């Protein structure tokens, strides 16, 4: 599983702190250790580690972070394969009859599902026919995230999202091209792409 350098440092520090004290560090103590003045930044690192299945915590409680041992973590889970997506067209719903088995760390905090890519016209976005897009249902995204969005109420896009005040920039992945610039009120985020799975 891929971790950023800082995520690995935070994960290691939490494990060492719990081993030494018998309880988890607070977000403030983690921030002090790494010289981070923003608790929000620490919270983001911890949240990402929770989403990847390496940590767990109780909601809204201080010192509730636990390191998930490998033996405790489910290795795979089933998520619904809810439909297919074609370039520029709304995805077709398949209901929840089909499922896809994925590593547990791919499942986000929100409802997570898969869409099958149906055509190769999305190749410019690093997607090929037969790929599966693993999507966490959300209505907002951070800059630089690959999102599933409805544009102008009609066109479905899988693009990198950048909010810029009243406008939104949507970048194609893997292609040097001018981004689409759209009024923010014409872009409806449906989810954030957590991974692209491809059969070799």
Image (cartoon, grey):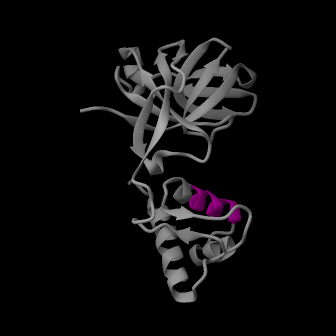
Q: Main secondary structure of the magenta part?
A: helix
Residue 52 seen from this side:
yes
Determine whether, in the image, residue 11 is placed left or right of residue 128. right
Height in image: 58 above or below 89? below
Give percent across and percent down for residue 131: 37, 27
Q: Residue furthest left?
A: 200
Observer-nearest of 82 and 37: 82
Height in image: 11 above or below 105? below
Give percent across and percent down for residue 110: 62, 43
Q: Residue furthest front?
A: 97
Give the image quarter of residue 126. top left
- Residue drawn at x 63%, y 20% is 150
- Residue drawn at x 59%, y 13% is 155
Determine whether, in the image, residue 131 is placed left or right of residue 52. left
- Residue drawn at x 49%, y 81% is 16
Determine whether, in the image, residue 86 is placed left or right of residue 50. left
Residue 115 sits inside the magenta stretch? no
Give percent across and percent down for residue 76: 40, 48
- Residue drawn at x 47%, y 14% is 87
Observer-nearest of 79 and 26: 79
Q: Which residues are magenta?
A: 38-47
Height in image: 163 above or below 105? above
Residue 174 seen from this side:
no
| Quadrant of the rendering where the C terminus is positioned | top left
Give the image quarter of residue 100. top left
Residue 39 sits inside the magenta stretch? yes
| Quadrant of the rendering where the N terminus is positioned | bottom left
């Amino acid at each position: 599983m891929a971790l950023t350098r800082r995520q690995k440092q935070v994960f290691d520090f939490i494990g060492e702190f719990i081993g030494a004290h018998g309880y988890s560090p607070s977000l403030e103590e983690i921030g002090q250790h790494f010289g981070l003045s923003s608790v929000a930044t620490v919270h983001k690192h911890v949240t990402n580690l929770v989403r990847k299945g390496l940590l767990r915590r109780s909601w809204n409680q201080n010192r509730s972070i636990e390191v998930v041992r490998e033996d405790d973590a489910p290795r795979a889970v089933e998520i619904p394969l809810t439909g297919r997506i074609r370039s520029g067209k709304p995805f077709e719903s398949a209901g929840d009859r089909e499922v896809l088995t994925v590593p547990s760390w791919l499942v986000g905090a929100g409802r997570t599902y898969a869409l099958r890519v149906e055509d190769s016209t999305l190749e410019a976005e690093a997607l090929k026919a037969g790929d599966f897009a693993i999507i966490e249902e959300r209505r907002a995204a951070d800059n630089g995230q690959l999102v599933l969005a409805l544009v102008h109420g009609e066109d479905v896009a899988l693009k990198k999202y950048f909010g810029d005040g009243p406008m939104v920039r949507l970048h194609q992945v893997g292609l040097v091209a001018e981004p689409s610039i759209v009024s923010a009120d014409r872009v409806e985020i449906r989810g954030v792409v957590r991974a692209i799975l491809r059969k070799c």
